[in-house]
Amino acid sequence: MAKNMQPIAKRCHALGISPAVMGYAKKTTNRNPGSQMRKKKSEYALQLAEKQKVKFVYGIMERQFRLYYEKASRMAGKTGENLLILVERRLDNVVYRLGFAGTRREARQLVTHAHFTVNGKKVNIPSYLVKPGDVVEVAARSRSSVKFSKLTGEDAPMVTLPQWLEREKNSLKGTVTKMPAREDIDLPVEEHLIVELYSK
């Protein structure tokens, strides 16, 4: 499977997003400190940058992202918002949002290694789309591992959940209570530019 191996901080700087969006609170870069002086970007460059931003944050390659766009365009409502909601519903993103992983990249790896179940059934596909009522849980065989045992108890890290997810206190189980809305997605992106890019 193709991977983007470019350094996180460098990529964030190029796309104008905070590394915190990726779950990397302490990463910084001093490369090209005068980048604000670059010449004005063309319309195409702005559209491409917005697309690359979403692909990078969610860890999606071009072919799959195109399929998400085509699916979003067939749904009722605004295509751009539908696109963001689709990628937000990915299982690896839900695992990250529930606080079971520190970054989406780590969440994708954990899902691939079958550490999670959805409604009691093992799911090892990061792109699996959750729906309201789904229960995402750490698999029984994985709960005793150091990685997950640290997520419960008094020393467990605090997690701010979006409104469409719930997680039982001191448990390794979360529930999708409703479909995510555009306002639940805190990624600074102008999705209409992505729609304009693909509509050409």
Image: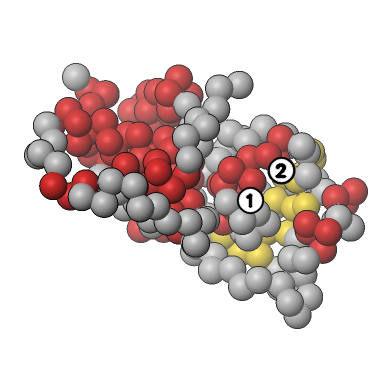
Which residue sits at x=63%, y=40%? 108
Q: Is residue 94 left or right of residue 87?
A: right
Kind of residue at badge 2: Leu
Write the residue at 78% across / 75% down.
153
The residue singled out by tag 1 in the image is 95
Q: Quadrant of the C terminus?
A: top left
Q: Nearer the viewer, residue 135 or 185?
A: 185
The residue beneath circle 2 is 110
Relative image position of residue 46 (x, y in whole percent): 19, 36
Disc nearest the viewer among 1 and 2: 2
Mark closer to the chain start, 1 or 2: 1
200 w.r.t. 124: above or below? above
Q: Is residue 46 visible?
A: yes
- In percent of width and height, residue 33 lies at 26, 51
Residue farthest bottom in this picture: 154
Which residue shows up at 55% across the image and 41% down it? 90
